[in-house]
């Protein structure tokens, strides 16, 4: 039923200015809208709406992620902009915070200013979707 409908992704913030800076200036997503209700960004054709809320409820798992061609290069670029990558106990992550899954995909996690867990994934074949 929804296979041909365009996906809209959501996150939340209680600090719109900080979120706007992070998503626009750090991650490089073009700002589409800054309304009283949400910030809207273009995430390669998918709209990411960062809802403006009084209190953010942070989930303990990944809520947004991007497929990239070269995860090491992307991690390096984001670290240069001040992004801190997460290290999880029980996962064998390298010095950059990159974990290789059993399928061969490489994954790294970081948080947005509200604390949402975001990820980068380099698929085994290097495809970036």
Image: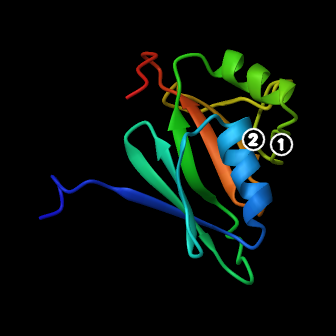
Is 119 in front, or is 42? 42
- At 80% from the left and 56% from the top, the residue drawn is 18
- At 39% from the left and 47% from the top, the residue drawn is 46
x then y, percent, for residue 92: 77, 33
Q: Is residue 67 above or below residue 59?
A: above
What is the basis of the colouring in this image? rainbow
Residue where numbered disc 2 is placed: 91
Image quarter where the C terminus lies is top left
On residue 87, the disc is 1
31 displayed left or right of 47: right
Query: Disc 1 vs disc 2: Cβ atoms closer than 8 Å?
Result: yes
- At 70% from the left and 66% from the top, the residue drawn is 60
Determine which quarter of the picture holds residue 125: top left
User: Number of numbered discs present?
Assistant: 2
Foreground tag (1 vs 2)? 1
Crowd class of label 2 (few under 14; some 14 to 19; many from 20; radius 10 Å) = few
- At 48% from the left and 42% from the top, the residue drawn is 43
Is 34 in front, or is 44? 34
């Amino acid at each position: 039923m929804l296979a041909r409908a365009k996906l809209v992704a959501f996150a939340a913030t209680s600090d719109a200015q900080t979120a706007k800076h992070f998503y626009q200036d750090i991650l490089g997503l073009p700002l589409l809208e800054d309304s009283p209700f949400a910030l809207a960004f273009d995430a390669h054709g998918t709209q990411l709406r960062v809802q403006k809320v009084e209190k953010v409820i942070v989930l303990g798992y990944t809520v947004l992620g991007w497929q990239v061609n070269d995860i090491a290069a992307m991690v390096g670029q984001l670290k240069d902009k001040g992004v801190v990558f997460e290290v999880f106990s029980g996962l064998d992550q390298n010095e950059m915070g990159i974990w290789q899954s059993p399928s061969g995909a490489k994954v790294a996690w970081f948080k947005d200013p509200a604390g949402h867990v975001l990820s980068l994934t380099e698929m085994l074949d290097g495809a970036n979707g």
